[in-house]
Amino acid sequence: MDIKDVKRVTIAGCGTEGSQIASMVAYKGFETTVWLRSEGSIERARPRLASVKKQIVGVLEAWKTDPSAYCRGLSDERDLAPEQIDEFIAQAEERLPKINLTTSLEEAFGEADVVIECINEDPAQKTDLYEKIAPVMPEHTVLLTDSSTFLPSTFADATGRPDRYLTLHFANQIWRNNLTELMRHDRTSDESFALAEQFSHAIGMIPLKLNKEQPGYILNTLLIPWFRAALQLVATGVSDPATVDLCWELDTGATKDQTPFRKLDKVGLPLAMHIMGMQPGADDPATVNGQIVALLKGYVEAGKTGIAVGEGFYRYDENGNVIE
Amino acid sequence: MDIKDVKRVTIAGCGTEGSQIASMVAYKGFETTVWLRSEGSIERARPRLASVKKQIVGVLEAWKTDPSAYCRGLSDERDLAPEQIDEFIAQAEERLPKINLTTSLEEAFGEADVVIECINEDPAQKTDLYEKIAPVMPEHTVLLTDSSTFLPSTFADATGRPDRYLTLHFANQIWRNNLTELMRHDRTSDESFALAEQFSHAIGMIPLKLNKEQPGYILNTLLIPWFRAALQLVATGVSDPATVDLCWELDTGATKDQTPFRKLDKVGLPLAMHIMGMQPGADDPATVNGQIVALLKGYVEAGKTGIAVGEGFYRYDENGNVIE
């Protein structure tokens, strides 16, 4: 299958990521369906999709007067006149409300060219869904999973189409952070891998390919040890966040907001605590990992969860600038 | 002792780092002596000091017409007229040739206010020097070591002045990369720690304080796991340098030359190979660390040692720009 043959795309699940993915797929002109387990899920999905539409239109509106509001995922071209941006707004206003929500497996998967699975990170639920949709999907359908925790080989057999199954992992605020990590397992075909790459481009994403399975993909494989090293220096009393960040800034030439503790404040300390809690020895306060979790717990319990609430390792004003 | 009382500074050793440190100390107006073990060492030191002077004057000359040549260590102020920069050039031309080179312990250490030890990373040589100079140095002298491998507690007793002994660790091309890492051991006095901080400022450096001993200080504690993660992704066949670097760039907003493989090319692959060779299991080709060392060895043996020779993970033109 060539990308030109991809017309109908179905997203299974409509949480934070599913709603963003469905919206971007629709924005880029694909016939988009969201499959949900129940009518209740559909009712919960509608305001989420409305919120994503509002964010996308809001970014486009802001971009008309403020070039720094430009988001790579929404337009390949950066320098556009307000009238040209109005065309993108019209496109969003027209296409996003047309996303079809259904609980019917037949309606959602019976004619889908590409399926993106974004349901809960629960292996039993994923296996169940894959087994149910396997007989419904057309032969040619490429099935992608947005799972951030599981490797695709885990579910390859359950899909019934291991060669047409791989990971397409998204970030958050995908119109802005428009990278996708494509991870094949050892039975993914070259053709499906290439299609997922073309499809990423077609929905405004920049694909990064992993030729083998790797927990954490590329991004978290890089970020987690970097975060851990920075946290270690503070948790063990060697240094403090501002000094560690200054060191990174001075040596690498990074800007202040690209330093480890500023980035942790963006990621959010509860998520950082969750990730560090999975490191070896994290439940033992005598280990470095235990001290790191204790440090993060102190911030989280004090309500200092990161930039989103105005305070984490740093304090922020309403524009997200650090208050010195 | 206050920084105002620091007049005479002695640098023991005049290798790559010693010659740069002695030059910056002299440039900033301190009476500077270099102690060396033999007349032969003195003869080898002279061209090294001359080369550093040439580099410093070269940077200052370039800065007169090119603002991007500005180096933080040479001037606090960034926006200066050519005539003002000429004063710095005159300062370098006058002060750097006055650096006193001697093999006499009495002459080098008998009146020194601050001593910076930059001799070989050989514990026996360091112990021997510390024991020899202990009775020669005045009571008030603060003794600093630029060691990048050893913790100061290792030698504190040999110095005979554990309270006035700590690490002051420099980078390379210190007029440009003007950060110092100050690491105290558990008997370093607050006064000596504070003096080392003031002294860093006085010689144009930005001090980063470590309140406890930490192998690798701040910078290498951050860099090494980050390098290792990036190298792992390539050594195990998951990805390639350009994709890993693009991922870091897209997610963190870093510029292309602040990404892991570009930075490795700057550090130099032989040094990276040496550092990764000290990781657990590095001599076993079946481990990830073993695969990382094998990857680096392939580049080093092919002469692709980094940006300095025009090729490492990337190929560079004569201006240090990547050839796509």
Image (spheres, coloured by chain):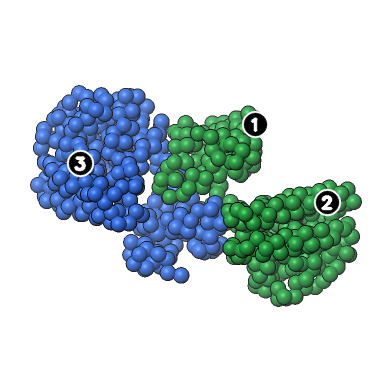
Chain colours: A green, B blue
Chain bearing mark 3: B
Q: Nearer the viewer, residue B308 or A310?
A: A310
Answer left or right for A140 relative to B5.
right
Q: Quadrant of residue A181?
A: bottom right
Amino acid beneath label 3: Ala
Amino acid beneath label 1: Gly
Determine which of the numbered discs, if any, sits on residue A314 in the image.
none
Q: Nearer the viewer, residue B82 or B324?
A: B82
Answer left or right for B220 relative to A314.
left
Task: State which tag comes first along the sequence, 1 or 2.
Answer: 2
Q: CA distance from mark 3 to mark 2?
A: 70 Å
Amino acid beneath label 2: Arg
Determine which of the numbered discs, if any, sits on residue A46 in the image.
2
User: Relative to B51, does residue A159 appear above or below in the rendering?
Assistant: below
Assign a secondary structure to mark 2: helix
Q: CA distance from mark 3 to mark 1?
A: 50 Å
Chain bearing mark 1: A
The residue lying at 44 percent from left, 57 percent from top is: B257
Q: Which residue is mark 1?
A: A303
Assign a secondary structure to mark 3: helix
User: Relative to B108, does residue A40 appear above or below in the rendering?
Assistant: below
